Amino acid sequence: MSLLWIAVIGASVLSFAQKWIGYQAPQDVLEQPRIARITRLLPIALLGALVATQTATSGAQIVLDARLAGLGVAVVLLVLRAPFLVVVIGAAAAAAALRALGWA
Amino acid sequence: MTALSPAPSPQRGSADARLRTIRRTGLSIGFATGLYGISFGALATASGLDVWQAMVLSAVMFTGGSQFAFVGVVSGGGSALGAALASLLLGIRNTLYGLILAPSLPRGGVRGAARAQLTIDESAALAASGADDEERRAGFWAAGVWVYVFWNLFTLAGALAGQRIADPAAWGLDAAAAGAFIALLWPRLRSADAVAIAVAAAFVALVTTPVLPAGLPVLAAALVAVVAGLLPRRGEES
C-alpha cells in the first residue's frame, strides 16, 4: 500500500474521530449555565465568521470580488423577507452576472 | 413562509409546515454544496490521487475544507503526512460543532455514528437555525444527508470528468455559500448583543486569515462567543 493511500485512510479515520469526540462531552457539563450560554452564542460567532471567510477570503488573502455583491443582494432579499432558496439563488445570480459581464 | 423566521407559532400544523420547510432548505443546501464536489473530484485527480482515493476522502473524511486542504498539499508537492496534518487542522471545528449539537441529537448506536459522520459546517449551521430540538434535529439530518449524497455523487462525476468541468465560481456558487450562511445567521440577529457577536466574529476571522493556517480563523472567531458568554450578564439574553 502506497504512502498516499495510508495518508488518505489515516486522515479520513482521524477526521471521523474528530467529529465523534465532540459528542462525548458529559451532558451535565454542557448544562452548566455558563457553558450553556457559550454554546448558545457559538453558532452566532461561527456563522458570522463563515459569512466573512466565504465572502472575502481566498486562501490566506482578503479578496473583495463579485461575492461581496452577492452578499449584498442576499441581505436585501433577507430584509424583504424572501425565502431561503430565493436568497441563495439571488446571491449566486448576482455574482455570476457580474462575472459574466466582466465587472468583477 | 420561511422556517428561518423567528416568530414561534403554537399550532401543530404550522410546526409541521416549518419542519417541511427546514427539510426543503436542507435539500437545497445539499445540492448547492454538493456541486462543489465536482471541483473537488477534478482537483483531486489532477493532483495525482486516483478516483478511489478521491472517493474515500469524500465518503469517509467528508468535510470539504479538509479535503481541499489534503489535495492542495499533495498538488503543491507536499508530503502525504503534510496533507493529512493540514486536513486534520481544518477538521478541528467539527469537534466544536459536536459539542454544540450534543444536547439536541440522539446518542449511541448506528445513529450516533451517523450523527458524527454528518457533522459539518452546513448541517451544524442549519441545525443551529432551529427554534427547538425537533427543528434542530430536522435541520441537521436534512442538510447532513443531502450534502453527503450530492457531495459523493458530484465528487465521482468530477473525478471521472477531470479538468474539463468549468469553475463553480463562474456560476456564482461561492457567493451562494455566503448567501446561505447569512440567511442562516439572519434570524438569530434579534438582539444588539447577537449583532455585536456576529460582527466581532467576522472581524476576527478576517483579521486572522492572513496569519493563521486555513480553518483556524473560524475557530479564533469562536473565541468571541466564549468571551461574550463569560462576561457578566446584563439581563438580556440573545
Image (cartoon, coloured by chain):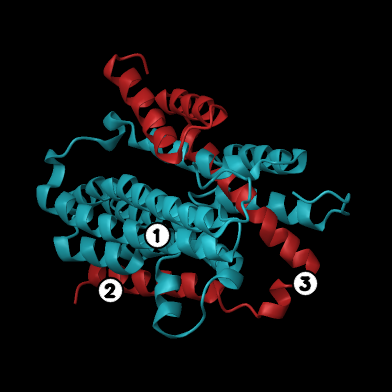
Chain colours: A red, B cyan
Residues packed near mark 2 inside 10 Å, few (<14), some (14 to 19) or many (20 plus) = some
Residue at position x 58%, y 37% in the image: B206
Residue drawn at point x = 48 percent, y = 84 percent: B108
Which chain's residue wears label 2? A
- Residue B66, image x, y percentages: 39, 57
Q: Chain of mark 1?
A: B
Q: CA distance from mark 2 to mark 3?
A: 41 Å
Q: Which mark is residue A32?
A: 3
Q: Amino acid at mark 3?
A: Gln
Number of callouts: 3
Question: Which residue is pictured at 66% across the width and 78% down the height?
Answer: A27
Q: Is residue B42 left or right of residue A85?
A: left
* Distance Cα–Cα, label 1 vs label 2: 32 Å
Disc 2 residue type (three-letter): Ile
Classify 10 Å Cα crowding around label 3: few (below 14), some (14-19), many (20 and above). few
Find disc 1 in the rendering and name its residue.
Answer: B142
| SS for callout 2 | helix
Task: Report whether mark 3 lies on the same chain as mark 1.
Answer: no
Label 2 vs 3, first from the N-terminus: 2
Name the mark on residue A6.
2
Instruction: Measure the C-alpha gap from mark 3 to mark 1.
Output: 29 Å
